[in-house]
Structure formats: structure tokens, C-alpha cells
Image (tube, helix red, strand yellow):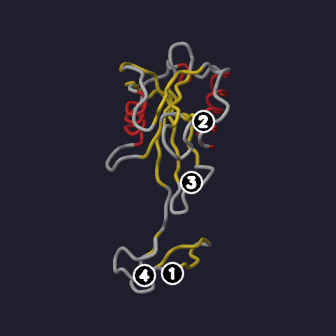
Amino acid sequence: MNFCPRCAAALETQTLNELPRRVCPACGYIYWNNPLPVAGAAVIDGAGRILLARRGVEPRLGLWNLPSGYLEFGESIEEAAVREVREETGLEVVLNGFLLSAGAGHRLWPWSSVTFSFFYARPIGGLLRAGDDADQVRFFDPVDLPGQIAFPAHEKALAQWQRDRVRGRGEAWGVGPDVG
């Protein structure tokens, strides 16, 4: 951001709270550049397989990830996770546990970053089909996951799912209590 959204003066970079911030010298506005929230879901079917979507758009075109996306205004993180699964995969799901919260682990764009919240989910309806920014969707066996995952936070979520699965955690098998 180069200009103040309040008064249109040119912003300057200053150090605040030990971090560089864009500050307006005319009116004092501070651009905090906070991370954007992203919601996602590890959809586990009755056979213990996990649903992944292959990205049909940049960034990370052609790589696999958990169904996920940005929150819409007024939407809860749980509502966003359910909506993103529907948009990307055609499935209706119910959330049944919290999986992981993670920072992006990377910065795709210099002007923003994201923070992820992943939930466990189980399918309750719909027809599996690629939609939105996915060009392919499918369930993977735990021992047959694709080699390249699109984002570090998704790798962390998949690793946590594997640990939970080995420990027999109920949500990992889609039998935990429904939430959200």
C-alpha cells in the first residue's frame, strides 16, 4: 500500500512494535497488514481416506491441497470451511473436530499473508466433482498421498491427520461429535 486510504497522502515505512509498518505522516493512519483468515477441512470418508483437491489456478497450479479458502465477510471460520468444501468438491459436509491452526509458512504475495484453521469433516451428501479453483478432486488412502502438496500449512495439517489417525482419534475417522 502506497497511499493512505483516509487522506491519500503518501505512506512512509516506520518501525512500530519492532516491525516495519506503513504509516501516514499526515493523519497518523497505520496500515497493519494483518494476515487473512483461511478455513479448510480434512474430509474423511468411511474408508478412512482423505479428500484432496488439485489446484486448477495459480498459485501452485497442479499441486494438491485440502479444500480451503478465505472467509467471506460475516461468515464464521466453521461456515467458511463447509462452504469451501462445497464449492471445490461438490460435497456437503459436517464438521466433527478441530484439526490444526497454522501460519502460512510462506508468503505468496508481498502485500499479504494468511493464517489457516483446519477442521475434520465427514461427507453427508452432494456429488464429488471438481469446482471453483480445483481441476480434480479425489479421496486418497493414507499411504498413497500425492508427493507434492501446494502449501506448507496443508503439509502440516496432513501430518497432524496422520498422527491422529495412528493414535485412533475419533475425528480422524469421521465418527466424532458434530460441531459448528
Read off the residue under disc 4. Answer: 28
Tell me which amino acid carries mark 3. Leu
Read off the residue under disc 2. Answer: 157
Q: Which of marks 2 and 3 is in front?
A: 3
Mark with earlier residue (2, 3): 3
* Secondary structure type for disc 1: strand
Give the class, few, some or many, for how many residues have Cα within 10 Å of label 3's Cα (few <14, many ≥20): few
Q: Which of marks 4 and 3 is in front?
A: 3
The residues bearing labels 4 and 3 have C-alpha atoms spaced at a distance of: 29 Å
Please give the name of the residue rendered at 46% of the width and 49% of the height, measured from the top-left corner. 37
Please give the name of the residue rendered at 38% of the width and 26% of the height, measured from the top-left corner. 90
Asked if disc 2 and disc 3 are in contact, CB closer than 8 Å, the reply is no
Q: Where is residue 159 in the image (x, y as percent from the top left)?
A: 66, 33
Q: Which of 141 and 130 is in front in this view?
A: 130
Tell me which amino acid carries mark 1. Glu
Tell me which amino acid carries mark 2. Ala
Mark with earlier residue (3, 1): 1
Mark with earlier residue (1, 2): 1
* Secondary structure type for disc 2: helix
